[in-house]
Amino acid sequence: MGSEQGTSKPLFDSSLDHNPDSVRKNDHIRLALQQQKAPKRNAFDDMRFVHHALRAVDQASVSTATQVCGEEWPLPFYINAMTGGSAQAGEINSLLAQAAAASGLAMATGSQHAALRRPELEPTFTTVRDRNPSGFVFANVGPTVSPEQAVRAVNMLSASALQIHINPVQEAVMSEGDRDYGTWPERIRAIAEAVPVPVVVKEVGFGLSRPTIELLASLGISTVDVSGRGGTDFAVIENERRTDRDYWYMDNWGLSTVLALLTASQPETVPGVALLASGGVRSPLDVVKALALGAQAVGVSGHFLATLTAHGVSGLVDEINDWASQVRALMSLLGARKVADLRHSDLLITGPTAEEARLLGVDLPALARRSAQ
């Protein structure tokens, strides 16, 4: 839908997009939406809260505020990186930014590489700041850009912070992807030193292991988004874009969001590193589960894109407001007056996630009795 009501033109009209960068971005949107049509079980379903009937607190006493990159957000979830770099992607960014402005959510753009290569594509990203002039906005680049290009990306959006996405699995499957990963750590260090805003390093749906987070900490990174398996699968997307689909076996590669959070935060979070989480977040309950595992805030992409596509800006704003109300209700039930209190809730981890977590040394029985400690 081209407007909030979806009556003027299709939202995903790609007829004006012909250059390779834009065609690839449109492929990503189309294939990501296809994955949203069949919601699937993921590792969040291996996680349950222990219910304590007399520990609930008044909802009026609950604060959903959280601290991210030195700023206070009113809600502990945000619109995570999706798109940009084509006409239809620009329209999506514009509508997402309207929803972010109306609801007070932070928002990230997709990778700005296309605009750094083709200045004519900058409006598909700058519309985010135009539509949301005072909101918290993440710029987005990968580790292959120069520090100077990273600064340009930040300035392009007057960004509040910068996401550096790391996506070796996607690049490996992508026909036109990068193949040189060895310089990425030092490039990340150089970008973080050059830009004038906080930096978040995030995966794109394959998870950050604890050793990776420890390495990032040594590079001067103080916030990471573990962005695990369970949501949009870019290995599947890039394999679908290949004529022979010969990377079919890469489905479900990586660490789930839950497993990445478990290993990142148990027995304690990597010193000096704040956690964000994304990947497979389908509901307010998934948000609260991720917060209970140590995330300061939770990114949502696919679900919000599908909601926007089906119901327009007003429908997405209604959904965000519903999620905010439900997160507050769940925190109340769990006796959490503030987000940090969720980290003392008792958790039951079962199924495949429990098996994987044990192999990685996570003390699951201790998680089930955290409130007694």
Image: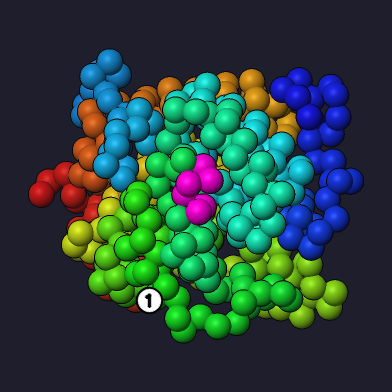
| Residue at image location 35% in from the left, 28% down from the top | 74
Give residue 217's position: percent from left, percent from top: 27, 67
Q: Which residues are magenta?
A: 152-157
The residue that disc 1 covers is 186
Left or right: 273, with 288 as reference point = left
Closer to us: 331 or 94: 94
| Residue at image location 79% in from the left, 35% down from the top | 11
Q: Is residue 55 above or below residue 5?
A: below
Closer to us: 315 or 132: 132
| Residue closest to the far left | 373
Task: Residue type at mark 1: give it.
Answer: Glu
Q: Is residue 30 above or below residue 73?
A: below
Give residue 333's position: percent from left, percent from top: 31, 28
Closer to us: 25 or 284: 25
Give residue 361's position: percent from left, percent from top: 27, 73
| Residue closest to the far top | 60
Q: Is residue 223 above or below residue 88?
A: below
Helix, strand or loop for the magenta stretch, by majority:
helix
Q: Quadrant of residue 303?
A: top right
Left or right: 268, with 352 as reference point = left
Quarter of the image with the N terminus in it: top right
